[in-house]
Image (cartoon, rainbow, N blue to C red):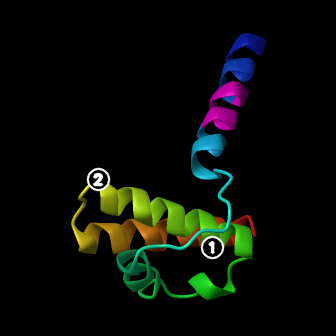
Amino acid sequence: MEHMLQYATKRIVELESLLLVDVTETIWPAEVGIVYGQVENAGDLPAHHQRRLKHHINRMWLEKMPVPAIVTAARSLAAAMEEYA
């Protein structure tokens, strides 16, 4: 049982590092701003979460995801970040 707990903890830390990347202050493309503007309450998030959200929006944009899918994913991500703000 302890082995499973260690594995689960390690996996959570790995996933958290993917979600909570350390993002420095940067200038984002206009497309990121357009999608970010469609995410309700994004501006209420702490600055570090706002930068992370923009980072993820930018990655999805670069991966050529459809804009509606990016907006949906960004809203979901922002809601999750709100819980850990």
Vertical order, 37 against 10 (above or below):
below
Q: Position of residue 51 (x, y in %)?
A: 62, 68
Q: Main secondary structure of the magenta part?
A: helix
Q: What residue is drawn where x is 75% and y is 70%?
A: 85
1 or 2: tag closer to the N-terminus:
1
Disc 1 on helix, strand or loop? helix
Vertical order, 35 against 2 (above or below):
below
Q: Position of residue 26 (x, y in %)?
A: 60, 68
| Residue range corresponding to the magenta coloring | 9-14
Instruction: Tell me where residue 23 sits by quadrant.
Output: bottom right
Determine which of the numbered discs, if any, sits on residue 38 in the image: none
List the single residue furthest toward the front: 27
Q: State the residue position of label 2.
A: 63
Task: Pick the quarter of the image with the N terminus.
Answer: top right
Q: What residue is drawn where x is 62% and y is 87%?
A: 43
Local packing at callout 1 (Cα closer than 10 Å; few below 14, some 14-19, many 20+) is some
Q: State the residue position of label 1.
A: 50
The amino acid pointed to by label 2 is Glu
The amino acid pointed to by label 1 is Gln
- Is residue 26 left or right of 56 when viewed as pictured? right
- Most foreground residue, 6 or 19: 19
- Is residue 60 left or right of 4 when viewed as pictured? left
Residue 46 within the magenta-colored segment of the rendering: no
Tell whether label 2 touches label 1 (CB within 8 Å): no
